[in-house]
Image (cartoon, rainbow, N blue to C red):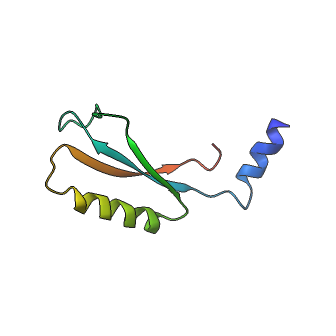
Amino acid sequence: MQQERNAERAGAGARSRYWVVGGTYTSTEFDQPEEKEERYGPYDSYAEAFSTWSRLAWKTVDDAHTRYRIVQSDPAS
C-alpha cells in the first residue's frame, strides 16, 4: 500500500512545490530565529514563490537580522 502511494506521488501529477521561509534572526549568522521561522506557501512555481520572497525582502531591506529564502520541497514527501 505504501509503495502504491509513493508511486502515485512520483507519477505525472507529482511536481516540486516551493516555500518562502525566514523571518527575524538573533544574529546575522541566520542560524537561530528569534521566534519560529515563518513559512509562506506552498507555491506551484518558482515565479510565484519569488514574488512573495521579493515582497518580503523589500519590506525588510533595512533590517540586517531579517532574511527570507526560497526552498524547494521534494515531490515524494
Quadrant of the image for the N terminus?
top right
Residue depicted at 13% across the width and 55% down the height: 62
Q: How many marks?
A: 0
Q: Residue at x 21, y 35 (%)?
A: 29
Residue at 81%, 39% in the rendered image: 3
Q: Is residue 54 left or right of residue 13?
A: left
Q: Is residue 63 left or right of residue 57?
A: left
List x then y, in percent, for residue 21. 39, 47
Residue 33 in the image: above or below residue 16: above
In x, y percent, where is residue 39?
A: 43, 47
Viewport quadrant of the C terminus: top right
Rendered location of residue 66, percent (x, y) = 23, 46
**Residue 65, x across and y down, in percent:** 19, 43
On screen, residue 40 versus residue 25, left or right, reads: right
Direction from residue 61 to residue 45 in the image, left or right: right
Residue reaching furthest to the front: 35
